Image (cartoon, helix red, strand yellow):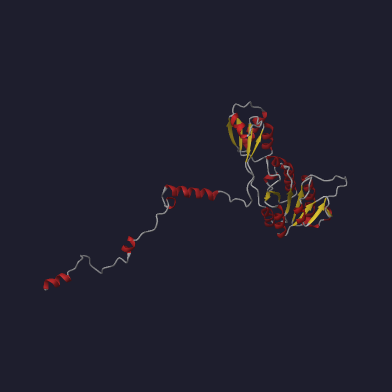
């Protein structure tokens, strides 16, 4: 019996002091830790480093504008056209020069302007340039113009209000000639306007021709593209802008319009058809430009310039 008692009281551990339990840690260590995370989320993995690098690059890029779809890329072909575009500051990104080209003064100037402007300068065989231009007579020079980054119509008024100014905006309704658009952009810039709005469809866009006609003003005057011009004008009205449409049969003459010294949108129609029906009905007032000489109409660029001058005179 004594032996049994000694065995029951015998210490089973050589450790001294109080015995501490595991606190359930052993049990938890046996439980599953869930699914294995993907490689891109595991610290130290190659895919994780690649994902982090991409995230850093995205953070450095500027935030996209709120406008709709960008325009389409464009090619300017031919020696005279390329040189003129580069002289006028058209925002080309790449100049393609044909291999073994017979160099003349225009080729040398184009290369010099491209170099000074930081453009990519690439040499390409003639068949490649023929393919790029669909067989046009490129004369060995092709400039690539990136898609124009249009603003959102609301951006124009918001920028003016943020600057503590009354918005002065021109909207073009059915104007299809890029040169007219460029002329309007130039006038808006000259008279302190805040931008131009064009429809997304069946209208002139910011092409190389528009850039050239603007004489550099397109670089500092935003152009917005509206999916629906009528809704864009209604949005301006809700923001407190008066929509003034130009029409040969307008009920007021230009000098009688009081709204020009406040927040205003000047709507200019096409030279032939004028304002479309829905846009004309949306205008708060329709005005006519008095023409003692008896001309029936002015082209869009000239008409916009006349009204912008009057608006700038009153605001001054």
Q: How many marks?
A: 0
Q: Residue furthest front?
A: 277
Q: x%, y% of residue 25?
A: 32, 63
Left or right: residue 94 versus residue 291 is left
In the rendered view, tell whether residue 14 sits above or below residue 54: below
Left or right: residue 292 versus residue 139 is right
Q: x%, y% of residue 131?
A: 60, 33
Left or right: residue 270 versus residue 66 is right
Nearer to me, 56 or 230 = 230
Left or right: residue 21 versus residue 276 is left
- Residue under the point 65% across and 48% down: 150
Image quadrant of residue 79?
top right
Q: x%, y% of residue 210?
A: 70, 42
Nearer to me, 206 or 176 = 176
- Residue under the point 69% across and 34% down: 81
Q: Is residue 114 in view?
A: yes
Quadrant position of the N terminus in the picture: bottom left
Q: x%, y% of residue 165?
A: 72, 56
Nearer to me, 94 or 200 = 200
């Amino acid at each position: 019996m004594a032996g049994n008692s000694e065995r029951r009281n015998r210490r089973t551990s050589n450790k001294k002091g109080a015995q501490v339990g595991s606190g359930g840690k052993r049990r938890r260590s046996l439980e599953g830790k869930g699914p294995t995370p993907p490689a891109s989320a595991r610290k130290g993995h190659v895919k994780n480093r690649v994902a982090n690098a991409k995230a850093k690059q995205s953070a450095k890029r500027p935030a996209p504008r709120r406008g709709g779809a960008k325009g389409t890329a464009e090619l300017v072909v031919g020696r005279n056209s390329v040189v003129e575009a580069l002289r006028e500051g058209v925002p080309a990104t790449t100049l393609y020069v044909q291999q073994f080209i017979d160099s003349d003064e225009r080729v040398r100037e184009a290369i010099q302007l491209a170099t000074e402007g930081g453009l990519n300068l690439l040499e390409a065989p003639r068949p490649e340039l023929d393919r790029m231009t669909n067989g046009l007579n490129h004369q060995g020079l092709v400039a690539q113009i990136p898609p124009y980054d249009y603003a959102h119509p609301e951006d124009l008024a918001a920028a003016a209000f943020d600057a503590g100014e009354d918005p002065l905006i021109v909207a073009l309704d059915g104007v299809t000639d890029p040169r007219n658009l460029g002329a309007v952009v130039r006038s808006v810039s000259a008279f302190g306007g805040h931008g131009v709005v064009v429809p997304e469809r069946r209208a002139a866009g910011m092409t190389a021709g528009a850039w050239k006609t603007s004489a550099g003003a397109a670089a500092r005057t935003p152009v917005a593209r509206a999916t629906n011009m009528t809704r864009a004008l209604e949005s301006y009205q809700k923001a407190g802008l008066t929509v003034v449409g130009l029409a040969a049969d307008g009920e007021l003459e230009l000098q009688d319009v009081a709204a020009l010294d406040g927040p205003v949108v000047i709507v200019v129609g096409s030279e032939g058809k004028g304002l479309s029906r829905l846009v004309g009905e949306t205008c708060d007032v329709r005005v006519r430009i008095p023409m003692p000489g008896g001309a029936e109409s002015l082209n869009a660029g000239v008409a916009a310039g006349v009204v912008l001058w009057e608006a700038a005179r009153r605001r001054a």
